[in-house]
Image: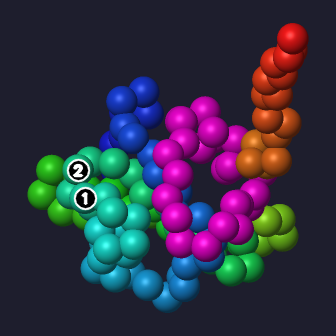
Amino acid sequence: MRIDWDKVNIYIRTGYTDMRKQINTLAILVRQECGKDPLDGSLYIFCGSGRRTLKALYWEKNGFCLWMKRLNEDKFPWPLKESSVRQITSEEMKMILSGIDFFLAHQEKKYEILA
């Protein structure tokens, strides 16, 4: 699996996914629940309910690639909002794999002075 991290779009499916699902079912989830095209060359990431397993689905030229990472002791940071899709950057993907929970990072507040 060769991915140009600077050019690929990365999407995560928030909430939990049944990790028994394989390529075909994950591709159906991408199309039906996420509203994306699984053949567009983007990387789609799914997380299991125990937050110890990630699966990544990716279309490369003539077929799907399915990548899986399972942690032995730690857990991946993951947003719990059910069945939505969120685009992340390659830097955020690296943070997820490193265990950094950027999902809980402080959001910028904007205030306005009323006169």
Query: Residue type at mark 2?
Result: Asp
Residue 77 lies in what quarter of the image?
bottom right
Which residue does the numbered mark 1 point to in the structure image?
A: 37
Give the structural element (helix, strand or loop) at label 1: loop
Q: Name the residue under label 2.
A: 40
Disc 1 packing (10 Å; few <14; some 14–19; many ≥20): some
In the image, residue 83 lies in the stretch drawn in magenta: yes
What separation in Å lies between label 2 and label 1 (alpha carbons)?
6 Å
* Residue found 44% across the figure and 33% down from its top: 5
Residue at 49% from the left image edge and 88% from the top image edge: 20
Q: Is residue 45 left or right of residue 63?
A: right
Kind of residue at badge 1? Asp
Residues at marks 2 and 1 touching, judged by CB atoms closer than 8 Å: yes
Span colored in magenta: 76-100
Quarter-wise, where is residue 29 in the image? bottom left
Number of on-image labels:
2
Find residue 67 and report its horizontal and vertical position in percent: 45, 63
Q: Residue 53 carries which label?
A: none
Vertical placement of residue 32 versus 64, above or below: below
Locate the C terminus by quadrant.
top right
The picture places residue 39, in percent across and down from the top left corner, at 21, 57
Q: Where is residue 44 in the image (x, y as percent from the top left)?
A: 43, 58
Q: Is residue 22 left or right of residue 110?
A: left
Q: Name the side, left or right, on which 40 lies relative to 75.
A: left
